Image (cartoon, rainbow, N blue to C red):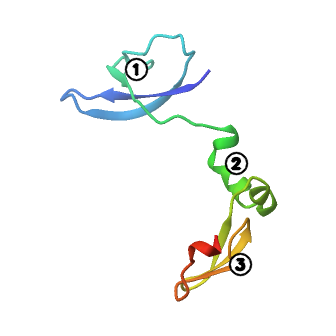
Amino acid sequence: MPFYIYEVIDENGQPGEQFEVFQKISDEPLTKHPETGVPVQKVITGCFIGGTWSDTAMKKNSSDNKKLDKMGFTKYVKAGDGYYEKRAGKGPDVIHKDNPIQPKDL
C-alpha cells in the first residue's frame, strides 16, 4: 500500500498543511482530515521509479567501465580544461579542445 499526500484547504481556498496517509490504491480519496475533519485534497506528486532505471542503478551501471564497453558505449572523463580521457569503448584515447575529433577518428 502506498503513501498519499493530502493538504488542508484553508477557508480562503488556499492550500495549507500537508500530511501523508497510508492507503490502498482502491480506497477513495479523503475529503476530510482524519483527525480534525477540515476539508482536504489529494496532492499529485511524482512517483518513485526503482529497478534498473533508478538514479542509483544508473549511476552504478555508468561507473562500470567494463560493462559500458561490453554494451557498446564509449565513456570519456574530464581530465582537465577541455581535455577528456577515454575510459571505455571505441574512439580516440584523448579528446582535446585544441585538436577536435575528425570523422576518420571514429
Q: Secondary structure at mark 1?
A: loop
Residue drawn at point x = 57 percent, y = 72 percent: 103
The mark closer to the camera, 1 or 3, is 3
Q: Amino acid at mark 2?
A: Ala
Q: Secondary structure at mark 3?
A: loop
Q: Nearer the viewer, residue 74 or 63?
A: 74
Q: Disc 2 designates what residue?
A: 57
Quadrant containing the C terminus is bottom right
Q: Disc 3 designates what residue?
A: 93
N-term mark: 1 or 3: 1
Q: Amino acid at mark 3?
A: Asp
Mark 2 residue crowding within 10 angstroms, few (<14) / some (14–19) / many (20+): few
Q: Is residue 54 above or below residue 38?
A: below
Mark 1 residue crowding within 10 angstroms, few (<14) / some (14–19) / many (20+): some
N-term mark: 1 or 2: 1
Q: Is residue 43 above or below residue 84?
A: above
The mark closer to the camera, 3 or 2, is 3
Q: Disc 1 designates what residue?
A: 33
| Mark 1 to mark 2 CA distance (whole Å) | 37 Å
Determine the image quadrant of residue 99: bottom right
| Mark 1 to mark 3 CA distance (whole Å) | 62 Å
Q: Is residue 52 left or right of residue 80?
A: right
The mark closer to the camera, 1 or 2, is 2
